[in-house]
Image (cartoon, coloured by chain):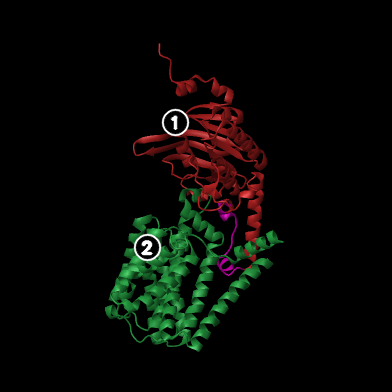
Amino acid sequence: MKANFKYNLIWLIVMIAGFYLINTLILVGVIDSFIANMLVTIGINIILATGLNLIIGFAGQFSLGHAGFMAIGAYATAIVTQTASSPVGFYASIFIGIIVSIIAALIVGIPTLRLRGDYLAIATMGASEIIRIIINNLKMTGGAAGMFNIPQFADWPTVYIMVCLTTIIIVNFIHSRAGRAVKSVREDEIAAEAMGINITKWKLAAFVLGASTAAVAGSLHASYLQTIAPNDFGIMESISILIIVVLGGVGSITGTFVAAVVLGVLDTVLQNFGALRMVIYAIALVMIMIFKPSGLLGTWEFSVKRLFSRSKRKERVES
Amino acid sequence: MRTLLKVDNVVKNFSGLTAVSNVSMHLDTNELVALIGPNGAGKTTLFNLLTGVIPVSSGSIVLNSDSGTYPLNGKPAYTIAKMGLSRTFQNIRLFKDLTVMENVLIAMTSKVKEGFIPTIFRFPSYYKTEKQLAEKAKQLLEIFELENDTDVLAKNLPYGTQRKLEIVRALATEPQILFLDEPAAGMNPEETAELTQLIIKVQRKFHITILLIEHDMSLVMNLAQRIYVLDHGSLLAKGTPAEIQSNPAVIKAYLGEEVD
């Protein structure tokens, strides 16, 4: 019990230290608004990709509809904060986004999660397109033009805290009874059922949790950028989230973090190269897939606990 | 001794092909029963029907447990598993990319209730249940001398140990009836002998009923108290090992008929 407390405390210190590091760098002027922008984008991508990694990497369900759930969160925030422009309104809008995305995930998930592999990918892609097209044709969402002048409540500290919070939720989910059940579904559905695991329930649980974190990311996206349009949440957005997951390693949350940072920085650096940017970006992706097909980190996971037990073992050997 | 599982006139049709036809059998408490038959007789299909992997076309399967009588046909596999019918598979179906410990812990999933919020925010109750589960799993692994392999990925275990782990995993669900589908398949005589001892040990220690499919006749004759013989989907014979060994119909099914 005490050891667990120690590990949790270390993580808490790491998170607070990270916060003050960025804060100081901004005060000193090392991080200008351009880099701060990049950091926020990376943060939002981390939230999106860890959620998708839970669905793809841990539950083994190949979903291509993540952008649809992100759209739900984004529009919930846009609509709510334009009428109730206050921090309370903003947090209420995140909550509303989560609730709506959970309902949408249940409606999409119950029929489609019976499918496997490519079929599931196509079905979830279709579902996400349906969400986008509904938004495109509603009056309250501003149609194809989208929504402007959304009040900005999400600054980088909000995004930072949300990244920490969603990561804690997803990592704790994975390292629990629930996470083991979800992983068993990925490994072998027939064996999982024979062990008393309701596979439909656990697939849905992972799908719904992933979708609700995507809605949070969408809310942050809308509130930070202040402008959203249905086309921001098309199939390309789903694929760019998928790229982060695959590149970092399917089944590694640490890998997702690394890939989101690497791709975020790469994208920003390459902006100076103009048209060459997409070519270099694509080549980088192809290279990583050739030399490290399982992603940058495979299924490796950073663990404070392991770090400690290793250094302890070393001490024992040395003494 | 009382009847634990009663199977009445179970039929399974696969679009025209009758894989199992009108099979009736019963399993008593604390009994070790073998199910034998030539290849393609429908043994594994019958296992799949009993454990709910595939639904029966007609017939009834009823469990008479301590807490009452439950019909099992039409129930999904996970409900049947929760009611106390656990199994192993002919072609090993471990969770290959997970550790030995995780394999056992997964089988205990339905035994504990832990809410979403306590899990996500790591309440003390979460650590308590996790610790209890880990201890229970460790005790079980110790019985089978697997306690030093807890962090090994299941796919990296030797073949015989994988078969053993599948039995441990099935036992972790705390079953009343354990179904073993060819546990000795692919084992050498030495390993088979070890497995025989293991199965006897399991039955004595856990006081459960075991139904096993096996082609290794020495194992079957040594272990089983009763034997059911399946051929072409229907029950050919039933009885004690001695009765089965001298049954002309069984000999005919296995060896064929003498030509004059």
Rendered-image quadrant of the N terminus of chain A: bottom right
Against B36, residue A280 (above or below) is below
- Return the x and y of residue A20 as percentages of the image width and height: 55, 82
Question: Residue drawn at (66%, 57%), measured in percent from left and top?
Answer: B132
Q: Is B118 covered by the magenta stretch?
A: yes
- Return the x and y of residue A113 as percentages of the image width and height: 40, 58
Tell me if A247 is positioned left or right of B220 in this view. left
Against B100, residue A228 (above or below) is below
Along the viewing direction, whichever of B6 and B156 lies nearer the viewer: B156
| Letter of the chain in red | B
Tell me if A210 is positioned left or right of B175 in this view. left
Against B226, residue A51 (above or below) is below
Rate crowding at label 2 as few (under 14), some (14 to 19) or many (20 or more) other CA atoms within 10 Å: few
Label 1: element kind: loop
Q: Tag 1: residue type? A: Asn
Residue named by callout 1: B39
Residue named by callout 2: A287
Q: Tag 2: residue type? A: Met
Tell me if A40 is positioned left or right of B170 in this view. left
Label 2: element kind: helix
- Return the x and y of residue B162 as percentages of the image width and height: 55, 44
The residue segment tinted magenta is B102-122
Along the viewing direction, whichever of A89 and A257 lies nearer the viewer: A257
Residue A63 visible in the current orientation: no
The hue used for chain A is green
Question: Residue drawn at (64%, 49%), measured in percent from left and top?
Answer: B148
Tag 2, which chain? A
